[in-house]
Image (cartoon, rainbow, N blue to C red):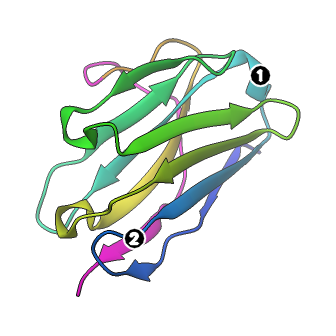
Amino acid sequence: EVQLVESGGDLVEPGASLRLSCAASGFTFRDYYMGWFRQGPEKERTLVASVQVMDSPTYYAPFVQRRFTISRDNAKSTLHLQMSNLKPDDTAVYYCVASPTIILPSTPVSYWGQGTQVTVSS
């Protein structure tokens, strides 16, 4: 059974930092591209960042503006998103995704997690 379990979401103030994590199981993690999508209230689902199999980022959304860093640990089958200088517009459910091929805004993905809520509010 494929599982992608996100954690780390929280309610924080603008300017704060958060580290999201995704624990993967049920597939060969080290052979898959990984990424993070997000969906804010009444907004479309948008790709935030993606990374190739050897921890080299393949995509960052323009709204990231160098504030976020995607990384993976193949030995632990985990994916991370380090977020800094969070803004209210970053409020969203963040989803971990996996694909056997590169993950870009227009490409499909094979597996989705259930998401973790990030809320940025003063």
Looking at the picture, tell me which residue is in the foreground, 100 or 34: 34
Which marked residue is nearer to the observer: mark 1 or mark 2? Answer: 2
In this picture, is 18 found above or below 11? Answer: above
Residues drawn in magenta: 105-122
Q: Residues within 10 Å of mark 2 (few under 14, many from 20)?
A: few
On residue 16, which mark appears?
Answer: 2
Image-based side of 61 in relation to 55, left or right: left
Q: Which of the two labelled residues, at mark 1 and mark 2, occupies the earlier sequence position?
A: 2
Name of the residue lying farthest toward the right = 75
SS at circle 1: helix
The image position of residue 113, as x and y in percent, is 55, 52
Taking the spot 33% from the left edge, 18% from the top edge, the residue there is 107
Please, which residue is most extreme toward the left here? 42
Q: Position of residue 30 (x, y in %)?
A: 77, 22
Residue placed at 24% from the left, 47% from the top? 45
* Mark linked to residue 30: 1
